Image: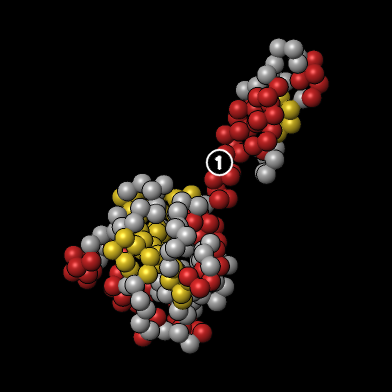
Amino acid sequence: MSSTTGNTIENDNYQTPINAVNALLKKITLRPTDIFLEPCRGDERRIYNRIDLPEDQKLWAEISEGVDYLKTPFKKVDVIITNIPFSLSEEFILKMKSEIKPDGTLIFLQRVNFLGSKKRVTFWNKIGFPQKCPILIPRPKFTKKGTDSCEYCWYIYDFGGRTSEIPPSFSHIISEKTAQTAQTAQTAQKIKELPNSKSNDNFSEVISLGGIYTNGSILDIAQYDELYSELIDF
């Protein structure tokens, strides 16, 4: 799915940004017995391959591989996570809701403005609004030509309590890269406030070992060690 201008991709086959997938999955608790379904697996299987369940507990459909979700019946499952084609969103959502168990969890990627429009008032009245809508930060990138032209969120119907780490209603879900950058900036600021530290404009920080040695008797060395550890992955 994408709302970027220009030529569209056949079957709305836009690969889900990996950072958006990772940010979501970190906040989901799957159960060992869960049966998972992905209605739009995609050529690169970016969601499917990251679901930590045995293969015999994972079901899928993908029109480019000859399995059309809208024409293929599935038994009720515990978890559905997918990036649905925008042009067939209503059809997919209705079918997915019919194939989720009463204590299941349904999650799909969609534009935030899909909640609006006069033509969808009846649709939302029929199925009910999602319980949670974490908005993706930063705005996702579906093509090589920059970020998309509108905001996106994960639409979540969680009847089984698998997304307890995500607050109800609207919130933000921050991608791995963005979160790391923010944490690095915060850590850099902490180090700047410590004595005998040096910094540059690129957030790379160097603690003066001489300063630690000279003042070791009065400084909390563990404090430096903890801050240094936070920077290792940067």
Point out the image quarter for the N terminus. bottom left
Q: Amino acid at mark 1?
A: Ala
Which residue has dot 1 on it? Answer: 182
Toward the front, the furthest residue is 33
Q: Quadrant of residue 234?
A: top right
Callout 1 secondary element: helix
Decide: few, some or many residues near mark 1? Use Cα within 10 Å; few <14, some 14-19, many ≥20. Answer: few
Is residue 146 something that shows in the picture? no
Q: Quadrant of residue 68?
A: bottom left
Give the tally of numbered discs. Answer: 1
**Placement of 149 over or under 186, stated as above or below:** below
**Relative image position of residue 84 (x, y in whole percent):** 40, 71
Nearest to the observer: residue 48 or residue 211: 48
Residue drawn at (79%, 24%) of the image: 209
Nearest to the observer: residue 108 or residue 142: 108
**Relative image position of residue 123 (x, y in whole percent):** 22, 69
Q: Quadrant of residue 154?
A: bottom left
**Relative image position of residue 226 (x, y in whole percent):** 65, 30
Q: Judge from the rendering whether residue 159 lies leftward or rightward of residue 17; answer left or right.
A: left
**Relative image position of residue 56 (x, y in whole percent):** 51, 73
Toward the top, the furthest residue is 218
Residue drawn at (43%, 71%) of the image: 37
Q: Judge from the rendering whether residue 10 lies leftward or rightward of residue 203; answer left or right.
A: left
**Placement of 164 over or under 98, stated as above or below:** above
Is residue 182 something that shows in the picture? yes
Residue drawn at (64%, 37%) of the image: 230
Residue drawn at (31%, 60%) of the image: 103
Nearest to the observer: residue 27 or residue 88: 27
Q: How is the image coloured?
A: secondary structure
